[in-house]
Amino acid sequence: MAKTSGSRKPVKARRPSLRKINPRVIRGFTRGSSAYERARPGYPDAARAFVTRTFTLGPEKTVVEIGAGTGKWTRQLVLTGAQVVAVEPLAAMRRQLRQAVPGVKVVPRRGEETRLPDASVDLVTIAQAMHWLDGPRALEEFRRILRPGGGVAVVYNERREQGVRGERLRSLLNRYRPRQYREYSSGRWKWAFREDPAFEPLRLFRFQNRQVLDREGMLDRYRSLSFVSALPERRRETFFRQLGILLDEEAARTRSDSFTIHYRGKIFWTRLKAG
């Protein structure tokens, strides 16, 4: 019978390395950061009121925003009176964020690896970005930095381009969207919450939102899409030429120089389970 050594230490399982951010995503959001700031919608007071009430936010609370981007949601969070920490990995987005929300603490890290202290946060919130994260790794990090009973709020402005314009825009975008592009609408980001026993089931709060943009604002709105801004120069030029034609025909059809985009606003929220 083979002998076993009693002195051998158990081998600790190696944690999988954090998946790199897709270079196309980095390129797209870097190129589109100015357009993102100019043309992405903000969030209505109703959204801020809900998170303030639900998580009793105030000066004694600390909120961490993951993937803060140019600070669209950050602007509402600072109005809650809570201490706000904005986590954003992309330098171009951070530059816009610091200009838009001067004085807010900005951490140049990924949401899956914030390096914030253990049990130091009352609320983790993510706007328009949860689908970009490595879900299980992100929730592991949220559990680490949240205080007992702390919460998570995932916020989305869900674009609703309706009617003739909506159909034509969807057709145009689908011709240029990469196959592996990570879409919020797939709902895959919710799986991590469903499989993590540390969190209560996700609940949903809805709000309404809209934008009224001129022609240049509409072009910026689509420049802010990462996969559009990441296109090679000639394909990007072709895309915007086709988009411009579509917008001009829509303006002629409606006899209006303004374009309204409606959004279904959604806040998915949960808390750490007691005990």
Image (cartoon, rainbow, N blue to C red):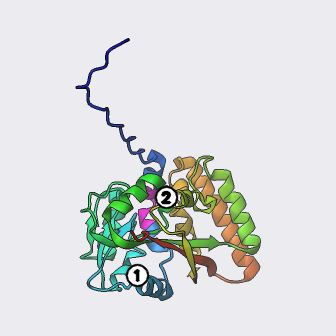
The stretch drawn in magenta includes residue 184: no
Please, which residue is most extreme toward the top here? 1
Q: Residue at x 48, y 72 (%)?
A: 270
SS at badge 1 = loop
Residues drawn in magenta: 29-35
Give the vertical position of 177 relative to 125 (above or below): above
Viewer-proximal residue among 241 and 262: 262
Q: Give the position of the N terminus as an image quadrant.
A: top left
Residue at (39% x, 56% y) in the render: 140
Task: Give the numbered dot on residue 196.
Answer: 2
Q: Nearer the viewer, residue 10 or 107?
A: 10
Image location (x, y in percent) of residue 104: 27, 74
Q: What residue is shown at x 35% (from left), y 85% (from top)?
A: 80
In the rendered image, is residue 47 in sight? yes
- Residue 137, given in percent of the width and then of the height, sits at 42, 52
Query: How far is disc 1 from disc 2 in space, using C-alphas?
Result: 21 Å
Residue 55 position by quadrant: bottom left
Q: Give the side of residue 137 with respect to residue 184, left or right.
A: left
Q: Which mark is residue 55?
A: 1
**Mark closest to the chain's N terminus, 1 or 2:** 1
Amino acid type indicated by mark 1? Phe
